[in-house]
Structures are given as structure tokens and as C-alpha cells.
RNA sequence: GCCGGGAUGGCGGAAUUGGUAGACGCGCCGGACUCAAAAUCCGGUAUGGGAAACCAUGUGGGGGUUCGAGUCCCCCCCCCGGCACCA
């Protein structure tokens, strides 16, 4: 073996061997247990960023570990290739999105290969390939036939200058990011998938997802937002019909003092027709983005509509207001306002001087009023006519009954979840496979004519989709006829593609079905790894889509992902200079030199190019805008893939944010180099057979050393397989390496234990630093077998036995001493030994022992005063 | 605003079921080797006091439960992720 650790030479050699052997290509083998390990596929933005490196290293470690357990492991990789950034690149550089995307894919594929990830590249797919999107077009026509697709108008962000729809991300402070024009909310026809038809199942099945983090399940539950209540109709006094609301609190019905509707509500629109003030108010409400986060932060504003309704039980006449905080997208777009018992209604009523009435009184008889704030807790009804003195459920039932009898309400289950808007007015996406006849009748494409191929050689003029100016794309015929037709120019939301790629990886070359029988072997995904930011949207859409596929006979299981691992972000400090006008210019950490004080604290930073100071900013997510990204490629070139892999896994557990440190990367490299040297020194004296229990019999020092080896195997196995805590697994191996380094004995028994210890370290590290481990394994085993398929090390339980244990002795919960005792000492012996300890005796002087708590194997706590 | 998460030395983090707070690594300080540097090795490193033994304090802030709280409960502050057209 090389005396020096030289990853630049080693890694390409090992990778070439894997490639030559096609080591990661897998086929279905019913005789073997399968393991499908999947990481969220990347958007091909140009270069890999650290978030990718982290994500894919976690996946690769798990995949390689499962392979050492003997599983048939599928780990595929592909590209989420449609999306907005390709269009931006097209507009800026006049390069067709397809060209830009494919060259990015080529570069990033090379980076992934250089990192040594064990992907089955024969299964690679890109969502912009017609062979891929053909099937989602086909599936869409199936969903259309099953009435799970429909068309309806919806509000979008409209840029009046660029004459285009904007993504929420493209609306900055209420203005279009390119034009700077105030955006408008505009209604246009859109395509929807009926996800609400699956709301109950999507909610219920969360309880069965034992391998998912509680936080993600809670977020999905709240997102689906199931609530039970009443749909109540308030009669409009102008005779134009009813104003419908949904409420979960019919017990507060007597506290309703006004009604509030969304600005887009028909009642508001009607009122605006003859009233310029209302029309102006609605217009001002329309000058904001569609983002709920933006809407909810707006100052609460409203206006009376000069419309009234009749209270269904009291007959009182209540005013109807339009309010900017009522969302048209939830419920009926109208609410009954109970300012006494709803905080938002309360604040609105205070601002506009509307009456506030208390109709709920806490059961405990506590004196809770509504002078300062709304009382939102449930309690006993009061001021409620015939319905006074009732508990919540009694009041609910009584009032619901009365309203039902009057024909004014019925029970309703309401979801916060809305149907999925899948159409986008964009070019770089999958064409929605429908045509419109001359009289505007909608006809889905026939299966034979699929795919509807997106033209890739396009020129960009302005910002709108080039499809709009392409008669060759638009002009077509009605399927199975010669009648002229017009093609739909909208494309799918890119979440559409990412909702089923996991299934397609099982059979990416299937050209007669969306997925074929091979998916039955591989699905469901055993572990899915990706960013926490996908907790709701992507992961909910994928679950929904999988159920759609199941109901179309394309999947067997109810859920696509058995286990979910959500990784945290990768962060780095920022460096900037602030101009007089407040504009900040950010500098990349690579271009900055930081000076530290004697404690190692960063105190100042200068830009290397001009030597002038820059300010040290907060530690934030690596991003283009903050220019704080560390390019993985630089580090790979400098230290090799294994060091980058080791550091990303060591720096933090997967779920946590990872704060990048260049010097700590150096530490990871040092560790590998040290291990390499240690193995080399051992091998230079000759390779021996690893130790067994017999080797160390009667030799306490070696017995203890061998126990350390097997304790480490047990810990690392638990950390990787159960806890997914790779950082502590690596720390445990580092400790073992430190211990092995200190072994000075050179007799046969000691060398056998050393051999066993080094072999164990290499096997335990193999999933994390596979190239380095490969090199070390070849040196330690002659002849060497394949490390990729070598069985994971086993714990020798007999090596773990201890005859003596150390117990901590506390007095009143404070550690005062440590006593060594036989491992089988009983309660009385432990207590006696603790009290006999000299430190303990000193601390107990003048005090009386009240109680002694013994925790076997851990500690003794003496309670005294 | 709503939903979810987080906060521990100079830094990243460890403490797995309520049981020794700070494993492991980085940084820093001191030493060895060297003509010198790099590399490597050895020692120290939460804070305050002390030569040391040791003592006191200490896990965002305030309160509580417990023999014992970083961990459980209540209140608060700050930071991060998501909020339906970024992916």
C-alpha cells in the first residue's frame, strides 16, 4: 500500500473499478430482500451545492450500509429538470432552456460521480425527457376520464407591464421583480386535481406512517386542516339569496354582530357595481400578491357594504362588511363575525366600532370578561335566548338542530386543504395534453398521439411563454378527426413530475406502461431523504399521486415512502459591505480573510483582493443572494471526496442545520490520513489473523481493548441503523482509532487485537468513506475480498462482559465521588460502599442521611440534611 | 398572522428511557522534533476562586414538578423552515 494517504490518486482508481464492474446496477431478485434508498432528485441549477452533497452523502451511507447487510439495494438518481430558473437563464442569455438544462445535468452528473455515490446510472431519468413526461400526460387523461381533473378560474399574480403571470417568488414588496410594476390579482381559467377527494385518506394514513418524523406528520395534519362544523345560510335582506358561512363554533351564534366577506366574494363585487368607494376598496385589495403569508400580515382593513343579513335565530339585522383578511380560498369566502370570541373579529370590531357581545362564560365560574381581548375558550352559553347555560357540545347540537329545522344549516366537514392547481402559464414544463375545438370544446389528447412534445428550439422575445407565438405547436387537430383544434399552451406545475419519479425509477425504460411489474418488487421506497422544506407540498402531492396510481392499478401499497429522513440546511457566515444608501454587497467567504482573537473568536475580516475591511454578518443558509456558498468542487479537488463526505456527516446530525467550517474539513482529512498511517504501520509488520476471545484470555489489558472494539461496533451499528446519527458513529470510531494508536505492545496477541480493531474501523467507516476504506481493506486483507459486499461487522457479546463497574455517588443530586464495585453488587453493598467513601463521609459531616436512591449500573444519590 | 422546529464552552456538536453536562472534532495556549518552516507528536482548554486538592456557578429568560431537570410542565424572548406559482 502507499505509505501516504493520496485521495487524488486513490479515488479515481476505485471509482473506475466500480464503473468497470457496473457495481451499482441492480436487477429485481425475488430471492433477496430489497432496499430502495432514494434522495430527493436535484433541480439542475448548474453546479452541486453543499445541500446536495449533504443530502446525497446521507443517502449513499445508508445505501452502502444496507448493502453490507446483504440487501439488494436500489439507489437511483435523476433530474427534476423543468422549472423557472431555466426560463430566467433563457431570458438573460438567450439560451434555450433545454440546452441550458442538459448542459447543467452533464456537469452535475460528473460531480456526483466524482463524489463516489453508488447510483445505478442505467436508471437515470430527466423529467424534461418526452419518454418521461409522456406518461404523466397519459395519466392526466386517465384522471380526466375519472373526473379527478377539472377547470375553474383562480387568482394569479399578474404583472400589468410584462403582461405575464408571476410566481409568488417573483413578487417583491408587491411589485413584479423585473418590471417593478404593482402586481394585480387576476382571475384566469386554471386546471385542478381533486386532492380534496383524498383528504380523509391522506389524513388518516398519516397515523400509519411510523417511519415519518412527528413534526412532518403534524404539519401535514394541520395543512389538511380537517374541521367539523356547520354550514349556515344567512338570508340577505335585499332578497338576492343567502350568504353562506362555515363555522366550527355555532355555540357562539348569538354573539354574531356582523358578517365579513372576502374582497373577491360575489356579494362584495355586487355591492361595488354601484358604489365607487367600495369599488376602489376592492381594487386596492387586488393590488397585492396571492401569497397567504403576505395577505395575513396586511393591516386589517374593511368597509361596510350597505348590505345586511337576517340572523337565523334572533331575526336581528346584521351588517355585511368586506374585509381584507377574509380569504376567498377557505370555506365559503365569508365568515360570521363573533368579536367576543374570536381574536381577529375582536380587533376588527375595535377598529371599526362594531358591537362586541359576550355569549360564552367559562364553566369554572371564573370571571373572564372580554374588555381587553376575545375569550376564545369554550364554556357555558349565556345571552343566548333559549340556549343559555349549555356546554359546548349541547349548545352545538341544540343550535344545529334549530337551524336544520328552519332549513338554514347542516353539518359539514371542512378542509383547509384546497384542490391542487396544476397548470402554469409557462414554457419550460410538460404540456398539458388537451386541445380545444373551434367552438372551444375541450378534448383530451388520445393515447396514440402522446407525448405532446414541447418544442425545444425556441427563441425568447420578452418574458412570455414562446409557445404563445408558435402556430406550429398551437395548431393541431381534434384527436381521431381532421377537425382543426387549438392546443393548450399551459404546462404542468413541476410538482407534477416530482410526484411519481420514485415509481418510474423502478422501470425507467418501460415504453408500454407508466410503470410495469418491476415496480412491485422495488416499491415502496424504504427510505426517502431530503430537505425539511418539502414537509408539506412535495411530500403531500407525492402521497396523493401515489394513491391515484394505486387506484389506477399502478401501485400496490397505500403510501410511497415507508421512512422519511428530513435533513437540515447547510449554512455559512456572511460577509458584506454596506453602501451609503443601505445597499449591501456580499462577498464570498473564499475571498475573505478573517482574523481571530486569542480565544479563536472572529473579530475582523478583510477582502483579500483589496485588503480593506468587510463586515461579518449572520450565519445563514448558503445562497446566491448572500454569496456565502462554499463550492463543493474546490474542496473535492483539494481533499478528495471522502474528506468532504466525512466532514458533512460528522459536523451535525442529518436533521440539524449544518454550519460549514473550512478548518474542520481539514480535521476530517487529518483523521483519514492518521488512520491510513496507522494501518500502514501495522501492515508493514505483517498482516495477521484477527483476535478472538481465546487470543485475549487471561490478558486483562487486551481484554479491555477488545471490549472497546466490540462496544464501538455495537454503538456504530445502533447509530447508523436505528438513530441515523452519523456524527456520533464517526466520533465513536475516532475514539477507537485514538485508543488503537496508543497500543505499544507488539506481541502476537496484541497484534491480533490490533488487526481486529483496524479491520473493524475500516468496515464501520466503509459506507462513509468508501474509497479510503477500499484502499485500507486491500492492505489489511490478503487476498482482499470486495468491501462493497463484505458483511457488516458483528458484535461478539462475550467480549462486552465487565466484572467491575464505576458508580457515581451524589449527595443531594451533586456528584461527590465515584466508587468501583463488582458488577453484581446488590443494593446493600452499593449503599455501604457509597457511604464508606471518604469524600462522601466528609460531605455528610453533621448531616443526617434521609434516603438513599440507587440506580443500578449508574449512580447512587444520598439525600441528607 | 398561522403551522412546525431550534437555542448547550471561543466554534460545530455529545449527553439514546429524568441519572456523572461538555464525548468527538475544530480553534486557541504551552511543549517536543527542526537551522527554520510545514507536517507530526505530547499536554492544557466551560466560567469564577485556588499552587493544588477542591469549592461555587453554569445548558436563551422567568417560574414549577422531582431524591435528581439540558431532558418533563407553564409563561416569555430570539432565530430558522413552510404558508399552496422557488424547487
Image (cartoon, rainbow, N blue to C red):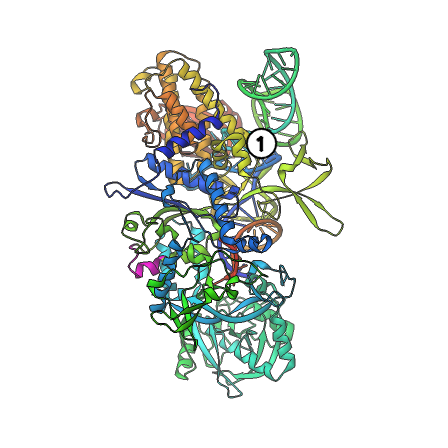
Q: Under tag 1, what secondary structure?
A: helix
Indicate left or right for B13 with A713 as reference. Answer: right
* Residue drawn where x is 34% and y is 21% of the image: A781
Quick check: A719 above or below A805? below
Tell whether A33 sits left or right of A319: left
| Chain of the residue displaying label 1 | A
Furthest residue to the right?
A: A580
From the top left corner, tell me how far across and down residue B33 is, in percent.
59, 11
Depth order, front residue of A779/A459:
A459
- For residue A801, side relative to residue A587 (left or right): left
- Can residue A525 be seen from the camera position used here? yes
Q: Quadrant of the N terminus of chain A?
A: top left
Total of numbered circles in the picture?
1
Give x and y (percent) for residue A183: 61, 66
Identify the image quadrant of residue A92: bottom right
Residue segment shown in magenta:
A546-556
Between B62 and A635, the one lying in front of the other is A635
- Using a 10 Å C-alpha cutoff, classify the residue at mark 1 as few (fewer than 14 neighbours), some (14 to 19) or many (20 or more): few
Relative to residue B42, is residue B80 depicted above or below? below
Q: Position of residue A474 (x, y in %)?
A: 46, 67
Quadrant of the rendered image containing residue A484: bottom left
As drawn, the residue found furthest toward the bottom would be A239
Q: Which of the pair A155/A559 is nearer the observer?
A: A155
Amino acid at each position: 500500500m502507499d505509505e501516504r494517504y493520496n485521495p487524488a490518486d486513490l479515488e479515481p482508481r476505485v471509482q473506475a473499478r466500480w464503473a468497470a464492474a457496473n457495481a451499482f446496477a441492480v436487477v429485481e431478485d425475488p430471492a433477496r430482500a430489497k432496499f430502495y434508498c432514494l434522495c430527493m432528485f436535484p433541480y439542475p441549477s448548474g453546479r452541486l451545492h453543499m445541500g446536495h452533497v449533504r443530502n446525497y452523502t446521507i443517502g449513499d451511507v445508508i445505501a452502502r450500509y444496507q448493502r453490507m447487510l446483504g440487501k439488494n439495494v436500489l439507489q437511483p438518481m435523476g433530474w427534476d429538470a423543468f422549472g423557472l430558473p431555466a426560463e430566467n437563464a433563457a431570458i438573460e442569455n438567450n439560451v434555450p432552456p433545454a440546452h441550458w438544462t442538459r448542459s447543467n445535468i452533464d456537469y452535475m452528473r460528473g460531480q456526483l460521480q466524482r463524489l463516489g455515490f453508488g447510483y445505478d446510472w442505467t436508471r437515470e431519468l430527466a423529467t424534461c425527457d418526452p419518454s418521461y413526461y409522456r406518461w404523466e400526460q397519459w395519466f392526466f387523461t386517465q384522471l380526466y376520464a375519472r373526473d379527478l381533473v377539472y377547470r375553474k378560474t383562480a387568482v394569479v399574480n399578474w404583472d400589468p407591464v410584462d403582461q405575464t403571470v408571476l410566481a409568488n417568488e417573483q413578487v417583491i414588496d408587491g411589485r413584479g421583480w423585473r418590471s417593478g410594476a404593482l402586481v394585480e390579482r387576476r382571475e384566469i381559467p386554471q386546471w385542478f386535481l381533486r386532492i380534496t377527494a383524498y383528504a380523509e385518506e391522506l389524513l388518516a394514513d398519516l397515523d400509519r406512517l411510523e417511519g415519518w418524523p412527528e413534526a412532518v406528520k403534524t404539519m401535514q395534519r394541520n395543512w389538511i386542516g380537517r374541521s367539523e362544523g356547520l354550514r349556515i345560510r344567512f338570508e340577505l335582506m335585499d332578497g338576492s339569496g343567502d350568504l353562506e358561512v362555515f363555522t366550527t363554533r355555532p355555540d357562539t351564534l348569538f354573539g354574531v354582530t356582523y358578517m365579513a366577506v372576502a374582497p373577491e366574494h360575489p356579494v362584495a363585487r355586487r355591492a361595488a357595481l354601484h358604489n365607487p368607494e367600495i369599488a376602489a376598496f376592492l381594487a386596492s385589495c387586488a393590488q397585492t400578491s396571492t401569497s397567504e403569508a403576505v395577505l395575513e400580515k396586511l393591516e386589517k382593513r374593511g368597509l361596510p357594504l350597505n348590505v345586511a343579513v337576517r340572523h337565523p335565530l334572533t331575526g336581528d339585522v346584521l351588517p355585511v362588511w368586506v374585509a381584507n383578511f377574509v380569504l376567498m380560498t377557505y370555506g365559503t369566502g365569508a365568515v360570521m363575525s363573533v368579536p367576543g370570541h374570536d381574536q381577529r373579529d375582536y380587533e376588527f370590531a375595535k377598529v371599526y366600532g362594531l358591537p362586541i357581545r359576550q355569549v360564552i362564560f367559562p364553566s369554572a365560574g371564573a370571571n373572564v370578561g372580554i374588555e381587553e381581548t376575545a375569550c376564545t375558550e369554550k364554556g357555558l352559553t349565556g345571552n343566548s335566548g333559549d340556549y343559555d347555560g349549555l356546554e359546548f357540545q349541547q349548545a352545538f347540537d341544540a343550535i344545529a338542530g334549530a337551524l336544520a329545522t328552519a332549513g338554514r344549516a347542516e353539518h359539514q366537514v371542512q378542509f383547509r386543504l384546497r384542490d391542487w392547481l396544476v397548470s402554469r402559464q409557462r414554457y419550460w414544463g410538460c404540456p398539458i395534453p388537451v386541445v380545444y375545438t373551434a367552438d372551444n370544446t375541450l378534448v383530451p389528447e388520445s393515447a396514440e398521439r402522446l407525448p405532446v412534445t414541447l418544442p425545444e428550439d425556441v427563441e425568447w422575445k420578452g418574458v412570455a411563454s414562446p409557445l404563445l407565438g408558435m402556430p406550429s405547436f398551437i395548431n393541431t387537430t381534434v384527436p381521431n378527426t381532421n377537425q382543426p383544434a387549438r392546443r393548450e399552451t399551459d404546462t404542468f406545475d413541476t410538482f407534477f413530475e416530482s410526484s411519481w419519479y420514485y415509481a418510474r425509477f423502478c422501470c425507467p425504460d418501460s415504453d408500454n406502461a407508466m410503470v410495469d411489474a418491476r415496480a412491485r418488487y422495488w416499491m415502496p421506497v424504504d427510505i426517502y431523504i431530503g430537505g425539511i422544506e418539502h414537509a408539506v407540498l412535495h411530500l403531500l402531492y407525492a402521497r396523493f399521486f401515489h394513491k391515484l396510481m394505486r387506484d389506477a392499478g399502478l401501485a400496490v401499497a397505500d403510501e410511497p415512502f415507508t421512512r422519511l429522513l428530513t435533513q437540515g440546511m447547510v449554512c455559512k457566515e456572511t460577509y458584506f459591505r454596506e453602501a451609503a444608501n443601505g445597499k449591501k454587497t456580499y462577498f464570498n467567504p473564499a475571498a475573505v480573510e478573517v482574523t481571530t482573537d486569542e480565544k479563536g473568536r472572529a473579530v475582523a475580516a478583510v477582502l483579500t483582493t483589496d485588503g480593506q475591511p468587510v463586515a461579518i454578518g449572520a450565519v445563514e443558509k448558503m445562497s446566491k443572494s448572500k454569496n456565502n456558498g462554499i463550492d463543493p468542487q474546490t474542496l473535492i479537488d483539494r481533499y478528495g471526496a471522502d474528506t468532504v463526505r466525512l466532514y458533512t456527516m460528522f459536523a451535525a446530525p442529518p436533521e440539524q442545520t449544518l454550519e460549514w467550517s473550512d478548518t474542520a474539513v481539514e480535521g476530517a482529512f487529518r483523521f483519514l490520513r492518521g488512520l491510513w498511517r496507522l494501518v500502514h504501520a501495522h501492515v508493514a509488520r505483517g498482516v495477521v489473523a484477527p483476535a478472538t476471545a481465546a487470543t485475549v484470555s487471561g490478558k486483562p489489558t487486551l481484554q479491555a481493548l477488545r471490549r472497546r472494539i466490540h462496544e464501538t461496533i455495537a454503538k456504530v451499528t445502533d447509530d447508523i441503523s436505528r438513530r441515523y446519527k452519523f456524527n456520533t458513529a464517526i466520533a465513536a470510531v475516532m475514539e477507537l482509532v485514538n485508543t488503537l494508536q496508543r497500543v505499544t505492545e507488539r506481541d502476537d496477541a496484541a497484534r491480533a487485537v490490533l488487526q481486529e480493531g483496524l479491520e473493524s474501523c475500516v468496515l464501520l467507516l466503509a459506507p462513509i468513506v468508501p474509497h479510503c476504506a477500499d484502499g485500507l481493506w486491500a492492505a489489511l486483507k490478503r487476498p482482499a475480498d470486495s468491501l462493497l459486499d463484505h458483511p457488516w461487522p458483528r458484535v461478539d457479546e462475550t467480549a462486552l462482559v465487565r466484572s467491575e463497574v464505576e458508580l457515581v455517588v451524589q449527595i443531594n443530586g451533586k456528584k461527590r465521588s465515584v466508587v468501583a464495585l463488582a458488577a453484581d453488587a446488590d443494593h446493600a453493598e452499593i449503599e455501604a460502599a457509597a457511604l464508606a467513601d471518604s469524600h462522601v463521609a466528609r460531605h455528610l459531616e453533621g448531616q443526617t442521611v434521609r434516603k438513599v436512591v440507587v440506580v443500578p449500573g449508574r449512580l447512587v444519590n444520598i439525600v441528607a440534611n
